[in-house]
Image (cartoon, coloured by chain):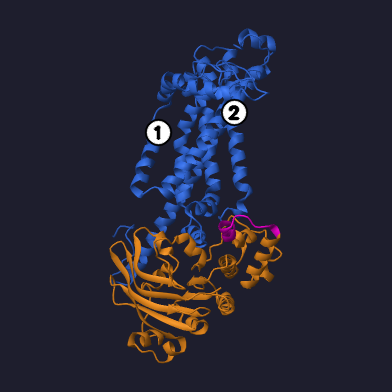
Chain colours: A orange, B blue
Amino acid sequence: MAQRIDVKDLNIYYGDFLAVEGVSMTIDPRSVTAFIGPSGCGKSTFLRTLNRMHEVIPGARVDGSVELEGVDLYGDDVDPVAVRRTVGMVFQRPNPFPTMSIRDNVLAGVKLNNKRISKSDADDLVESSLRGANLWNEVKDRLEKPGSGLSGGQQQRLCIARAIAVKPQVVLMDEPCSALDPISTLAIEDLIQELKKDYTIVIVTHNMQQAARVSDRTAFFNIAGTGKPGRLIEMNDTATIFSSPAEKATEDYVSGRFG
Amino acid sequence: MTTTDSPPDARPGPARAPARRRRRTGDTERGFSRVFRWVATGSGAFLLLVLAAVAVFLVARGLPALTASPDELSDRGGLPTGMDSLWDLVGPLVFGTLLAAAMALLLATPVAIGIALFISHYAPRRAASVIGYVIDLLAAIPSVVFGLWGGRTLAPVISDVWVWVAGVLDVLPFWTVEVTNTGRSLATASVVLAVMILPIITAVSREVFLQTPTLHEEAALALGATRWEMIRTAVLPFGRSGVISAAMLGLGRALGETMAVLMILSPGILYSFQIFDSGQQQTIAAFIASRFAEASGLAVNVLIATGLALFVITMVVNMAARAIVARRKEFSGAN
């Protein structure tokens, strides 16, 4: 239920504009990898190339390769829809479907993937996914209520439940706590520790303490100036990045001297 | 002094001057906001007043027809021969109006939703704007032109289609389908009505679909939705109440449309589902238009009473639409 990601020499373009240049990295299964860096350095853009969500923006394209257990996500016969079923995503702001109940939100992805599911299987899946997202006890009595009635933190955990209900290999999280209060943030961080037993987790965060708390490995991205492409500066074990980074820029960033 | 509408000055100056200027600006803004409030309130009240005036006119002038005796109605009321109460006239007219509008809506709404989705989510940007422009042009064609086109060009052509459709439907055991060779039937009128209400439904639906939050679209795509599945899970539920409003706007126009129906339909005042035959139904608006010029005395009151019926129908349709929209407010995404 967790797979390894290999990225080789990836360039990301928006039209003619080179947004991110020359990223190579390996992301281990059953681990949490954090991307940190100043705004606009391309870490979210890069995250989106891991499940081809950047293709939603017209003109966005990549060259280089992203391999999931040796299979190139950008191969000719690979359907982006299939990629996104294997590599799930949680967004910056909680986005449950407002017209659906909590239960239907959890089942949304499953109903897309294999149209028919029996009532009892669906009930089991709703319960296991919500338990997996530490939300079951809070919502088990109101599964038919709209998901938009939950608090922000609960909505975000509902989105995580929705993402893991389709049983992905990898879960990408794009600043999942940036719209949440500290208590809800803590709940999500605890949940990430649980989830890494089963999934490969990649998280983008602006919060360096969060990266230090939740991740096993950390990648630091930076940008030389406006209009220049973002680059991967260094990637290492989180403890090393925060105590003795190899690059001066990394040290300046994690010690709070810029960014 | 400086003008009062200039923004607070950023340059350092005498300490007193900015303070005085700020107070003046505040006064002006307060005055402006008061004026604006009265203008807005006045506009709202004026709207209600106009509506009330129309309702009062319809009731006051329609009342003589409602209270007249059957003899008076058939003598001076201009009722068609064989009718001895107002309801004999208004009933079939209401039926014809609703049937024509419902068929037009049934034809137009799916097409309009399809066009709106194509423009908002499928077409390349340049093609989308061209198509949107063409659809808007449809709205600029006067209804009398639609009437001419429908009666002169469409009716003879489409009558062949109706003959074929009637032949197919004739298989049904409970319905003997009559069909005219002239094409001047309610079915033809409904097709033209559908073309006429297409632009408004398309335009409103397109705007609603474009407003679907990117967050929800991305949520669906990230779960592995194809484009159609994304539309089904994110766009359509979000746009549902907007599409209903759009359809109701179209229905309102279809209910009240006069010229096109008048010029296409060969009328009759019957409760009849023979939509492919001529001389079966008539709509209220077309009926009033066809009679008003020569009506006098009680006959005018009769026509105004039928107008009152149309007014009530339109009100009920709009209220029903609002009720549908409000019923699932909890799930609408507004919170």
Q: Which one is nearer the viewer's eye here, B280 or A236?
A: A236
Give the magenta-colored segment's residue range.
Answer: A108-119
Q: What x and y, as percent, mark residue B316? A: 62, 35
Q: What x and y, as percent, mark residue B245? A: 54, 42
Q: Secondary structure at mark 2?
A: helix
Q: Quadrant of the N terminus of chain B?
A: bottom left
In this rendering, position of residue B59 left or right of residue A204:
right
Three-letter amino acid code at the position of disc 1: Leu
Q: Which residue lies under the disc numbered 2?
A: B98
- As for residue A111 lying within the magenta part, the answer is yes
Three-letter amino acid code at the position of disc 2: Leu
Q: Which mark is residue B138?
A: 1
Q: Quadrant of residue B12?
A: bottom left
Residue at mark 1 to residue at mark 2: CA–CA distance: 23 Å
Q: Quadrant of residue A43?
A: bottom left
Is residue B74 depicted above or below B272 in this figure? Answer: above
Q: Quadrant of the C terminus of chain B?
A: bottom right
Q: What x and y, as percent, mark residue A146? A: 63, 58
- Residue extending farthest bottom: A244
Q: Which mark is residue B75?
A: none
| Residue sitting at x 50%, y 32% | B253
Is residue A172 depicted above or below B137 in this figure? Answer: below
- As for residue B99 lying within the magenta part, the answer is no
| Residue sitting at x 34%, y 42% | B130
Q: Secondary structure at mark 1?
A: helix
Q: Chain of mark 1?
A: B
Q: Is residue A212 visible?
A: yes
Q: Quadrant of residue A237?
A: bottom left
CB atoms at circles 1 and 2 under 8 Å apart?
no
Q: Is residue B50 visible?
A: no
Q: Which one is nearer the viewer's eye here, B69 or B81?
A: B81
